[in-house]
Amino acid sequence: MNFLRGVMGGPSAGPQPSGADTIQKLCDRVASSTLLDDRRDAVRALKSLSKKYRLEVGIQAMEHLIHVLQTDRSDSEIIGYALDTLYNVISNDLEEEEQDDSEEENSAKQVDDLGSQFTEIFIKQQENVTLLLTLVEEFDFHVRWPGVKLLTSLLKQQGPQVQQIILVSPMGVSRLMDLLADSREVIRNDGVLLLQQLTKSNAAIQKIVAFENAFERLLDIITEEGNSDGGIVVEDCLLLLQNLLKNNNSNQNFFKEGSYIQRMKPWFEVGDDNCGWSAQKVTNLHLMLQLVRVLVSPTNPPGATSSCQKAMFHCGLLQQLCTILMATGVPADILTETINTVSEVIRGCQTNQDYFASVNAPSNPPRPAIVVLLMSMVNERQPFVLRCAVLYCFQCFLYKNQKGQGEIVSTLLPSTIDGNSVSAGQLLCGGLFSTDSLSNWCAAVALAHALQENATLKEQLLRVQLATSIGNPPVSLLQQCTNILSQGSKVQTRVGLLMLLCTWLSNCSIAVTHFLHNPANVPFLTGQIAENLGEEEQLVQGLCALLLGISIYYNDNSLENYRKEKLKQLIEKRIGRENFVEKLGFISKHELYSRAAQKPQPSFSSPDHMMFDHEFTKLVKELEGVISKAIYKSSEEDKKEEEVKKTLEQHDNIVTHYKKVIREQDQELEELKQQINTLTSQNEQLQATVTQQVSQIQQHKDQYNLLKVQLGKDTQHHNSHSDTFQMNGIQTEEVSKLKEELEEWKNKHELLQGQLREKDSVIEKLNSSQLEMGTTEQSSQTSKSGGLEHNSELQKELEMLRSQIQLQSAEISKLQKENQKLQVMNATPDPVLGDSGATAATSSELEARLEQEIKELKSEVKALSEEKESLKQQLDSSSSTVAILQDEKSKLQREVAESKKEQDDLLVLLADQDQKISALKIKLKDLGVPVEDEDDIESGDQGDEDEDGDEEEQD
């Protein structure tokens, strides 16, 4: 307060200066003071005055405050005061709160303009916004928080301009994204509000924010806050997500590809008891449902919508929404929005539509969800918005769903009516003929969607018969609709029925014939069109004109009295062509028609405005021009058109026929290709089998030839002796092989003996070296003894090896003797060659002996190979023993060398000590100190010892 008194000019007594003067002095102090404390106090005072004197502070102090932001960044306190002051000047929120209780209504507009004007002044220099972005990066709470609030206010006042400045600023958007990671919840929550304003209607910034990992951070915040049970922060995050995704195909695709749809499922988990929801939870859940609708909106590209719909089904989100749909205790507005959300999730997606058709309500007995919803739609006691939502759901269920359309129509056909349960078709008929005009309209539109672009169902619906009253014959559904039209019911009911009839008759000549077959229908339509009625009836007149035009355009001239030409003449006489076309134009010129044509969802402010359906507006747009032209065509043109149509039909039939033929030929080609592939594979298998069999046959041939050579199968008897010689020849080959093996064994035996001699010499050398090293130290003696023991073991092993070698040499000599005997036997001629019986006996004996000897030789060879392996193992063990002894020898040599070195060092030390002792003795003698020599000392010691000995002897 002392500072303020000084600024205001002395003591409080006397006249007080005005607010403008005080602000001017404070501004001068901020601009001229050299002390930081003075400037800080002045800015603090401006902050306190900025709420009351907003205009004065804004005009006089803004430039000085910006200068403070540029020059005094080292002091966080003054920066915080300056940012708060600028926020008070620019923001309109504070003024609006104060004016709620004030009576100054004229100044309200000025307040709104004031913030915008100050914002324009601030952002005129783009460096100011860049400076503010830099300050928002500061971690200090007193700088960052007011900076965030000021930037949010600037975006509220001049959004597009500030967005453009931030967009061109280096890393401008990325700096602001860091606010979501701030650990202080106040800054994080205000950061969400800032990003809401930043992303409004700016696709470029929306993409940058999305690719800065905004989805992940926002979903984490929603989860941390408790999903739908969270507070206002969840609502702010959901609004920001809507800004990022709405009408932004790139971000929607990124959201889907990032698997963020799966993270939405926990939002819609509701319990059994749904009573007592807070207002915030209702708001949050409403926004969550809207966010789902943003992803599957009919205005999105079809491909993006379809992929999101499939993802929602696979992750269980659609199932969760259907659970809310069938739950009890859910607030009405949430239920309505859930129905709208489910509608768009299933619209045009066959998989989702099939799942929705299988959903049952938790009732006893269970009823399909579609039936339960239709019961709400035709119930006049239900809220209007809920009935509209159910109608939209039914329309989306039937959109591009011929299977669903057929199921609905089948519930009306006589063969499928079940008297024990209420079906969808029965509910629609009941709504169509009830006393509630809104139920009439909704049921008519729903039934029209069941026939949309499905000529087969239009024909089948002609079979539906209705029992109007007891005792009277049943009438067709088509006839009942025209009867209600002629009874002069409410406008809404007539509009609904006319839309149903127009949809039913369009592109269905059989339905047109049935309609014209009733003689009262055409006079009724012409009478309605010809009358000059009020504005309310103009819409009905336009629809009657459309229905009559459809009856002309799709007429196949099967009824003589209602041929196209006669109907045109009737219009010319009773209505006039120009008048007819004018009445037809009433439909597209109507305001409610324009509203309905904008989007598929039926959204009306009141039931009275519920007149047109979105799909019907497409039909009107398609047929209006065609019917207008058809009315003015002459009979000749009609004939030409009929001829052209017939020609086109014939051409289409021909094309269809050829397409069918081509399709059949394609199928046949595919079948033939498959057969060719099958036969090719079979052929390959057979070829492989043949080659395998050929190789086997060749092997059998080779074996046969070998056996033939070995056994010598010959039919002539006199070749038996030659067979014996042939066998002996074979045995001779085996003997030669055995000789070669014996030679190999001899060579290997000599090699093994040489290796053993080398090992013996190495071991003898090691023994001699160990004996020489044994005199060095006591520790080495133990190692020597161990080495000698090891050597003795080696010698034992060598003796065993020698004995085994002697045994082998004996066996070899035995084999040589047997070999010589075999050679003698082969060389000795048989003396009784002439006697065939003796020859055969001799040959059999020789074969037996040879086979036995060959077996023995083979067993001996096997034994020799085993002995060879054992010898190799023994040699390996001896070589490893030699290596160990060599290592021990090297260790002993190193130890001997070290001990010698130590002895030399001790000798050197002793010599040095002797020299020092002799030098010291000389010095002592020079000083006159008696010194005994070592010899004297030794002799004295010896004399003492002798004396001690004599004394002992005397004792």
Image (cartoon, helix red, strand yellow):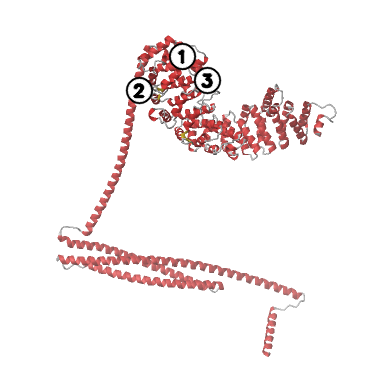
Residue neighbourhood size for the residue with mark 1, other residues' Cα within 10 Å, grouped as few (<14), some (14–19), many (≥20): many
Identify the secondary structure beneath mark 3. helix
Could you say which is closer to the camera, residue 422 or residue 855? 422
Q: Nearer the viewer, mark 2 or mark 3?
A: 3
Answer left or right for 449 relative to 648: right
In the picture as drawn, the residue positioned furthest to the top comes out as 573
Percent across and percent down for residue 908 are 64, 70
Q: Give whichever of discs 2 and 3 has the lower sequence position.
A: 3
Q: Give whichever of discs 1 and 2 has the lower sequence position.
A: 1
Instruction: Give the residue number, with chain letter if any, for mark 2.
Output: 652
Residue neighbourhood size for the residue with mark 2, other residues' Cα within 10 Å, grouped as few (<14), some (14–19), many (≥20): some
Percent across and percent down for residue 938 are 68, 80
Instruction: Give the residue number, with chain letter if any, for mark 3.
Output: 592
Instruction: Give the residue number, with chain letter if any, for mark 1.
Output: 528
Identify the secondary structure beneath mark 1. helix
The residue depicted at 48 percent of the width and 13 percent of the height is: 582
Answer left or right for 632 relative to 930: left
Distance from label 1 to label 2 (Cα)?
39 Å
Query: Is any part of residue 851 visible from this angle?
Result: yes
Percent across and percent down for residue 399 are 45, 28
- The vertical placement of 617 against 675, above or below, is above
